[in-house]
Image (cartoon, rainbow, N blue to C red):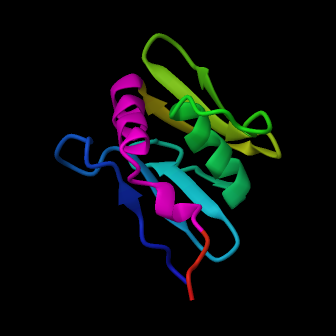
Amino acid sequence: MNPSWQKSSYCSEGEACVHVAATPEVIHITESSDPTGSILTATPAAFAALLAALKNEPHPSRPSIEVTAGDADTLHLRNTDAPAAVVTTDHPKWEAFALGVRAGEFDHFVEPVKL
């Protein structure tokens, strides 16, 4: 099954941005201009903790998705439960993603399915 990727509406024109997709079991995060083509996978709970952290909301545990500085221009995302995949982005793309998170654009990835 090919996931449908979503980026924040705050991203500038073009495809180079942080993208999120979901399959029934996991959430996928990538950066379309990352030269490694890495795709980070996380549980919905781990992604929900990341969303809560970016919204400055209290969350019960430390997010397992880490965001660390690579150098002055880059950021690295990795899941501490599966650290081999590292997604690289830059500060403007991450900020566009964070603005989308704060606007609720990615909440549906962690909301329970309503039957």
Q: Quadrant of the C terminus?
A: bottom right
Q: Residue at x 36, y 34 (%)?
A: 93
Residue at 71% across, 37% down: 59
Name of the residue lying farthest toward the bottom = 115
Can I make out residue 86 in this image?
A: no
| In-image side of 20 versus 79 (left or right) | left
Q: Position of residue 10 (x, y in %)?
A: 26, 41
User: Does residue 10 sit above or below 28 in this rendering?
Assistant: above
Q: Position of residue 72 (x, y in %)?
A: 46, 10
Look at 77% across and 33% down and name the residue there: 62
User: In the picture shown, does residue 2 fall above or below 79?
Assistant: below
Q: Of all residues shown, which one is farthest toward the top?
A: 72
The magenta region covers 91-111
* Total count of labels: 0
Q: Tell me if 31 is positioned left or right of 54 in this view.
A: left
Q: Position of residue 61 (x, y in %)?
A: 80, 37
Indicate the position of residue 88 as horizontal and vertical percent values. Answer: 52, 35
Q: Is residue 97 visible?
A: yes
